Image (spheres, helix red, strand yellow):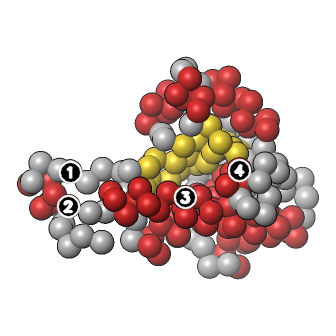
Amino acid sequence: MSSQTDEDAEADGHPLAPVFRICFVCTGNICRSPMAEAVMRQLIRERGYEKLVTVESAGTGEWHVGEPADPRTVEALTRRGYEADDHRARQFDPAWFVTHDLVIGFDRGHERILRSWAPSDDARASVQIITDVDPEGAGVDVPDPYYSDADLFDQVLSVIERSCRALLQQLEPALRQGAR
């Protein structure tokens, strides 16, 4: 990573700006998407890319807006060493397409809804399913654990961890370029 500070970069006329802006989107923003946000933030932090990638999450529905993550989500994340205490659910706003490079859903329903909200072909192209990058589960929907037990939360977290690692691996060449 470059030894240039943010202030130095800005003084040189090259402000450091995020290379990638990601929003994970599930149904209510209390289970899957907060998991992915927490996992990806930690992976980014571990590799020193915090200034190059922004990560957020939201839901397609408004049912849980303002609520914390489901307690089972927090428990699953905490058991594996992730931070998840300050999450508050919110609904995805289609206006966000212009401020995000990737809008990542967890199943074909999310993909369909998000693409229908997209205002342009470019915005539709930014919509992906998280498992599309997962070599072990490419194209498989991530089940919603909300109506299940803690075991499914742990299984879902495993899929999300694997998919987030694969996603970051794909982004890393561009991130290394952005870090120079």
The relative height of residue 155 versus residue 65 in the rendered view (above or below) is below
**Residue corresponding to mark 3:** 170
**Residue corresponding to mark 1:** 15
**Residue corresponding to mark 2:** 6
The reply, left or right, for residue 44 in relation to residue 9 is: right
What's the CA distance linking mark 2 and mark 3? 25 Å
Query: Foreground residue, 58 or 112?
Result: 112
Res 47 quadrant in image: bottom left
Tell me the amino acid under the disc marked 2: Asp
Dot 4 or dot 3, earlier in sequence = 4
Tell me the amino acid under the disc marked 1: Pro
> In this rendering, which labeled residue sits more in front, label 2 or label 4?
4
* SS state under label 1: loop
The relative height of residue 141 versus residue 175 in the rendered view (above or below) is above
Residue count near mark 1 (Cα–Cα under 10 Å), binned few <14, some 14–19, many ≥20 = few
Residue count near mark 4 (Cα–Cα under 10 Å), binned few <14, some 14–19, many ≥20 = some
The reply, left or right, for residue 135 in relation to residue 125 is: right
